[in-house]
């Protein structure tokens, strides 16, 4: 079922065009542009009209976009309505019946309704002759979405109510109860407590069945029909939550603005606005949760977890559990990097006499330097990663596992989080799970899989209005670009991430983007620049930096500092890193600590530390870092004139880097082999394009080979045409070709 946008409770007049003149769709930020295209069903004329009518706040993504068809593209809708009015009355009646059966809720009852009312379907021939609609096996197919909407919107209110009542009469099966309720509600003449209760119960049923779009439509209709203002506010809050789950962020934000539900607003802010504000509101909401709600302030279900069945409560729905709000506050702290403020959330939990969520308690213990306590709390959270769990709990299990250096369990938890979210129809939670899955894939030697996952999640995050998540994914993609040596793309991604992160106080993506740039410098041999960036990262506070990213980047900082003979700060950073590694017992962290110790130890004494590092890597999962350890060890052995072992280590590192598609690191291994006087061999050029290209380059290459223009590819991948041009030049360089014709032939030969 497609996302539902029911008629609003009060219809405002469309905003006027901007004073500066028409605004092209291409000038909108990526997230806004994708949501515009989705709202107008991909129609370029409607997209252009809507883009020109957006306010400055809407165009910047600060205010929700309009969702009512009359506000989206009134000129396009008017043109379609004029065309509909030229048809005979009996043709329009059949088309109205078909449209009401499909929009805004699909019920698949047209043929039964025609039979029950003994309607003659021959008048549909006029619509077919006009190219407006055509008969199908299941009923009627419209020319496009705007034609279907125009048919429905053109009809008189009495006619719409009549066809809804007819459709309700023919929906008899128990499984069809929610859709029967929808038509009964749409056919109502005015407020009705009985119908509102029926719609509310049907919405709860749809929610349990994992159909948030239908639940949102039913609950919003229930709010429209409810004669009680208090119930209406409660129902609107649940409708907003359902709309958010359904991936309709603009509808969700519009509905949420009509309620006084602060926890709901805070949870939406967590994914769309300043994360520090979300943290404050979530902690305050948890603190108030034990007190009765003040009049006019209605609680609501929570995005990211299945809302409570509102039919079970006669007046006010319960607020999300205080523990759940505090768990989300921990998420907000993770995004901001202001981890010390988690103490506030823990104090609130203790004041409410509840156990702080494990992720929250683990963060506080780590910030306080109680590493053993942190390990135990995070371990308990990471252990809750069994199949079929709550998507939020599984996500937190994945984050805890990442903090413990357990990338295998992190991958399992985040994959299960995404699967649980899909099973429940909670589409908003899928891309968030993939944000953190990317870390596990990247560090365990699957950078192409990580990049592909992140690209898919980025588009989904933008489409569902989760700009903060998209920012985090942009930073992750900057890191992947650094690994593959694509400097221009790395800098573009990092700049996009940092621009959004710094205006929204998101320390996590800001720090990750800075690390990506430092990693790019490190791989290219710009050690001074890498050390400078990483020192700046270590000094960055919340909103600009992040303690966890600083910790993860420590091995790279030590390497850059050693190369620049400035190890005083690096030694202190390594000491803390080593203490954490020993507390959690992660083989990967212990291996990297041993590598740092080797780098900081002069001469032959470093050899045993390198051997210890490689022994520990054998029990870990960070295959890429193992290859870097072999490269550094091989370089040290070369300087110590241990030629045979140096050659073996360097060849092993080279092979790994080539398999990862890391040209800078591979070039470093070849340079060491040349200095050793050993043949390194040329870069492998006989492999298939899928091996030689990054995931994004391969995607662009296939689209280009299929005949898509740079602008078309850019629109589909949420990138600029300039970036697509850069990608194609990179594709041609890596494949040794000069034109799209050669690209088509090469892909046909290797994939055909």
Image (spheres, rainbow, N blue to C red):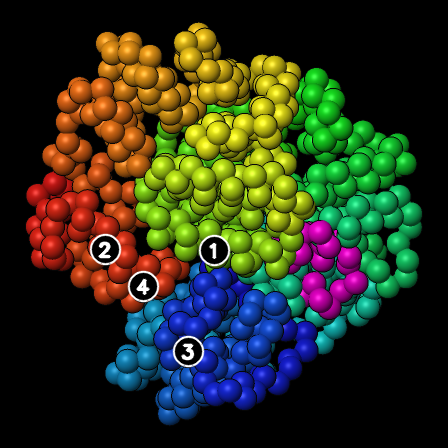
| Element type where label 4 sits in the image | helix
Nearer-the-camera pick, 40 or 276: 276
Q: Position of residue 286 (x, y in %)?
A: 81, 45
Asked if the residue under mark 3 is in contact with the one under mark 2, i.e. CB atoms within 8 Å, the reply is no
Eyeballing the image, is 668 above or below 723? above
| Element type where label 3 sits in the image | loop
Q: Residues within 10 Å of mark 3 (few under 14, many from 20)?
A: some
Select label 4 or label 3 by which is in front.
4
Mark 2 and mark 3: span between their CA atoms? 25 Å
Q: Residue at x 86, y 63 (%)?
A: 296
Q: Position of residue 605 (x, y in %)?
A: 45, 8
Name the residue carrying label 1.
495
Q: Position of residue 242 (x, y in %)?
A: 62, 55
| Disc sitting over residue 722 in the figure | 4
Asked if the residue under mark 1 is in contact with the one under mark 4, i.e. CB atoms within 8 Å, the reply is no
Check the picture and name the quadrant holding the C terminus. Answer: top left
Asked if the residue under mark 3 is in contact with the one under mark 1, i.e. CB atoms within 8 Å, the reply is no
Eyeballing the image, is 208 above or below 142? above
Q: Residues within 10 Å of mark 1 (few under 14, many from 20)?
A: some
Q: Is residue 504 visible?
A: yes
Mark 1 and mark 3: span between their CA atoms? 23 Å
Q: Residues within 10 Å of mark 4 (few under 14, many from 20)?
A: few
| Disc sitting over residue 24 in the figure | 3
Please provide the residue range marked out in magenta: 255-277
Which quarter of the figure has residue 213? Answer: bottom right
Which of marks 1 and 4 precedes in the sequence?
A: 1
Which of marks 3 and 2 precedes in the sequence?
A: 3
Is residue 680 a member of the stretch shown in magenta? no
């Amino acid at each position: 079922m497609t996302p539902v946008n029911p008629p609003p409770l009060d219809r405002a007049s469309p905003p006027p065009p901007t004073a500066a003149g028409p605004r092209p769709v291409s000038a909108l930020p990526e997230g806004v542009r994708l949501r515009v295209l989705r709202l107008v069903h991909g129609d370029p004329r409607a997209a252009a009209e809507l883009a020109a009518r957006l306010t400055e706040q809407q165009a910047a993504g600060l205010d929700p976009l309009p969702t009512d068809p009359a506000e989206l593209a009134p000129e396009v809708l008017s043109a379609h309505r004029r065309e509909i009015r030229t048809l005979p009355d009996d043709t329009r009646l059949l088309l109205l019946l078909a449209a009401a059966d499909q929009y805004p809720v699909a019920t698949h009852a047209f043929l039964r309704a025609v039979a029950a009312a003994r309607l003659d379907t021959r008048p549909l021939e006029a619509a077919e002759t006009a190219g407006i609609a055509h008969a199908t096996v299941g009923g009627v197919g419209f020319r496009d979405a705007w034609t279907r909407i125009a048919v429905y919107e053109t009809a008189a209110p009495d006619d719409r109510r009549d066809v809804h009542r007819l459709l309700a009469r023919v929906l008899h099966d128990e499984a069809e109860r929610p859709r029967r309720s929808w038509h009964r509600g749409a056919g109502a003449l005015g407020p009705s407590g009985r119908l509102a209760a029926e719609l509310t119960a049907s919405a709860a049923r749809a929610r349990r069945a994992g159909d948030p779009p239908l639940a949102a439509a039913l609950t919003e209709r229930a709010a429209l029909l409810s004669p009680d203002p208090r119930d209406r506010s409660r129902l609107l809050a649940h409708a907003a939550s359902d709309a958010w789950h359904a991936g309709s962020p603009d509808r969700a934000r519009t509905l949420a603005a009509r309620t006084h539900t602060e926890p709901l607003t805070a949870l939406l802010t967590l994914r769309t606005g300043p994360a520090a504000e979300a943290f404050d509101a979530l902690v305050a909401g948890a603190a108030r949760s034990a007190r009765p709600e003040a009049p006019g302030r209605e609680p609501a279900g929570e995005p990211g977890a299945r809302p409570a069945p509102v039919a079970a409560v006669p007046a006010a729905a319960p607020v999300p559990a205080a523990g759940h709000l505090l768990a989300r506050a921990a998420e907000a702290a993770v995004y901001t990097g202001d981890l010390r403020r988690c103490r506030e959330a823990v104090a609130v939990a203790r004041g409410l006499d509840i156990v702080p969520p494990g992720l929250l308690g683990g963060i506080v213990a780590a910030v306080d330097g109680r590493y053993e306590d942190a390990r135990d709390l995070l371990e308990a959270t990471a252990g809750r990663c069994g199949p079929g769990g709550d998507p939020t709990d599984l996500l937190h299990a994945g984050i805890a596992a990442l903090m413990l250096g357990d990338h295998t369990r992190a991958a399992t938890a985040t994959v299960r989080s995404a699967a649980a979210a899909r099973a429940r129809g909670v589409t908003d939670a899928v891309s968030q799970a993939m944000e953190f899955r990317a870390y596990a894939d990247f560090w365990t030697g699957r950078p192409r899989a990580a990049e592909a996952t992140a690209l898919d999640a980025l588009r989904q995050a933008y489409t569902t209005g989760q700009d903060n998540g998209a920012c985090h994914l942009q930073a992750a993609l900057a890191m992947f670009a650094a690994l593959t040596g694509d400097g221009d793309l790395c800098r573009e991604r990092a700049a996009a991430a940092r621009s959004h992160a710094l205006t929204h106080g998101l320390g996590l993506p800001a720090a990750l983007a800075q690390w990506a740039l430092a990693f790019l410098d490190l791989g290219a041999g710009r050690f001074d620049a890498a050390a400078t960036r990483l020192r700046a990262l270590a000094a960055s506070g919340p909103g600009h930096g992040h303690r966890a990213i600083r910790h993860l980047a420590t091995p790279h900082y030590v390497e850059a500092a050693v190369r620049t003979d400035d190890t005083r700060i690096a030694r202190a950073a390594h000491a803390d890193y080593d203490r954490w590694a020993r507390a959690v017992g992660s083989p990967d962290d212990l291996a990297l600590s041993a590598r740092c110790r080797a780098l900081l130890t002069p001469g032959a004494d470093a050899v045993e530390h390198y051997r210890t590092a490689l022994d520990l890597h054998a029990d870990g999962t960070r295959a890429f870092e193992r290859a870097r350890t072999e490269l550094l060890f091989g370089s040290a052995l070369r300087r110590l004139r241990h030629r045979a072992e140096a050659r073996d280590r360097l060849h092993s590192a080279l092979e790994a880097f080539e398999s990862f598609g890391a040209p800078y690191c591979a070039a470093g291994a070849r340079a060491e082999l040349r200095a050793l006087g050993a043949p390194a061999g040329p870069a492998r050029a006989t492999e298939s394009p899928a091996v030689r290209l990054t995931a994004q380059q391969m995607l662009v290459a296939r689209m280009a080979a299929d005949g898509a223009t740079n602008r078309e590819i850019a629109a589909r991948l949420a990138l600029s045409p300039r970036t697509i041009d850069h990608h194609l030049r990179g594709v041609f360089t890596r494949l040794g070709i000069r034109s799209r014709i050669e690209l088509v032939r090469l892909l046909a030969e290797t994939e055909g």
